[in-house]
Amino acid sequence: MRAGRTGGRAPTGEGSRPTVLITGIAGGKGQVLARRLADRWRVVGVDRLPWRSAPRGVEVHVADLRKRPFQDLVRRRRPAAVVHLALVRHFQVGERERYDINVHGTRRLFEHCVRYGVRRVVVVSSATVYGALEDNPHYLTEEAALNASLLSPEIRDLVQADTLATTFLWRYPDLSTVVLRPVYLVGPSVHSVVCRYLRLRRVPMVLGFDPLFQVMHEEDGIEAIAQAVEVEGLRGVYNVAGPGAVPLSVVIREAGRRPLAVPELLLRPLVGRLFRARAFPFPEGSLPFIQYPCTVDGEAFRRATGFAARWSLRETLRSLGGGRAH
């Protein structure tokens, strides 16, 4: 499920810049990625929300991946590469809408890419698709089963979107598809579930559990995505790991917060009530991710691209310190 690089980078020069289309460009990761690619690529972005402060030269369209205007955009712009960031990872929308956006939206995107001659698609999935299980090995490789739905059914749509992308990878060998499964990205531009969790004033843990945890600074994560776009010949499925893995309690303390250990029998219903009141970032079905390990081996991506995290684990975690505690 992996392939290496054959060497070379995207062409440079103002007159020869290829077009890259970024879905979900108005989000934190999309904005950082657009700025990273803008000097080598003509950047076109699409999102259901506007990006009013987009830098000059970045073309942004408000559109839904499931609707005809998005298809028309792909047909008109004929991008050389597409980066798919528009997967819903939070729980602020209903389960049916998440499924429709993540699964049907991903299918539509691939159909348009095949139809209009896109040469490369980079789908930014997540290491969470492997699931947090008690018997997980310390470091999961790309060949591990995607078991997230077993204990965390709320994210089965992400697993299905990842599986769909992998299906297109093998069905259309002329389309260079790269599926990235990065660890949690944190930093000042990312407003993810895990960032919200680590920015709580007292961060709850499950009493008796302190699993290994992996995070990566947003700038390192964006650089990994950019390399997946630019490294010629790259295709396949790749984990993207950061500077290392440490116990969750260490992550919390290095982020400048205090852990609060609560028995599971009390924590599970409490998290359920707080989540329904929009006072907690994830539902009780996601508790396994702070109870059991879900750590990945990123060696294959490092070998294929030369990627290495530039931010240390301590620097990465301390970048969360400026977040507002709740």
Image (tube, helix red, strand yellow):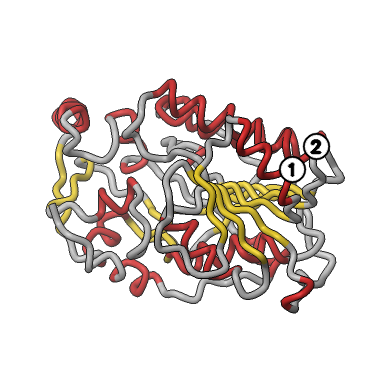
Residue appearing at x 27%, y 61% in the figure? 250
Q: What residue is shown with label 2?
A: 115
Residue 118 coordinates in the image, percent (x, y)? 77, 48
Given residues 245 and 215, the one toward you in this image is 215
Visible in this render: residue 300?
Answer: no
At label 2, the amino acid type is Arg
Given residues 147 and 186, the one toward you in this image is 186
Residue 101 coordinates in the image, percent (x, y)? 51, 31
Residue 46 coordinates in the image, percent (x, y)? 54, 48
Image quarter of residue 292: top left
Given residues 155 and 15, the one toward you in this image is 15
Image quarter of residue 224: bottom right
152 left or right, relative to 164:
left
Q: Nearer the viewer, mark 1 or mark 2?
A: 1
First of labels 1, 2 by sequence position: 1
266 left or right, relative to 293:
left
Residue appearing at x 70%, y 67% in the figure? 305
Q: What residue is shown with label 1?
A: 75
Residue 172 coordinates in the image, percent (x, y)? 83, 38
Quarter of the image with the N terminus in it: top right
At label 1, the amino acid type is Arg
Q: SS class of the residue under badge 1? A: helix
- Mark 1 and mark 2: span between their CA atoms? 9 Å
Residue appearing at x 57%, y 72% in the figure? 308
Given residues 70 and 264, the one toward you in this image is 70
Visible in this render: residue 74?
Answer: yes
200 left or right, relative to 180:
left
Q: How packed is label 1: few (under 14 Cα within 10 Å), some, or many (20 or more)?
A: some
Q: SS class of the residue under badge 2? A: helix
Residue appearing at x 76%, y 56% in the figure? 80
Cβ–Cβ under 8 Å for marks 1 and 2: yes
Q: Is residue 236 above or below residue 298?
A: above
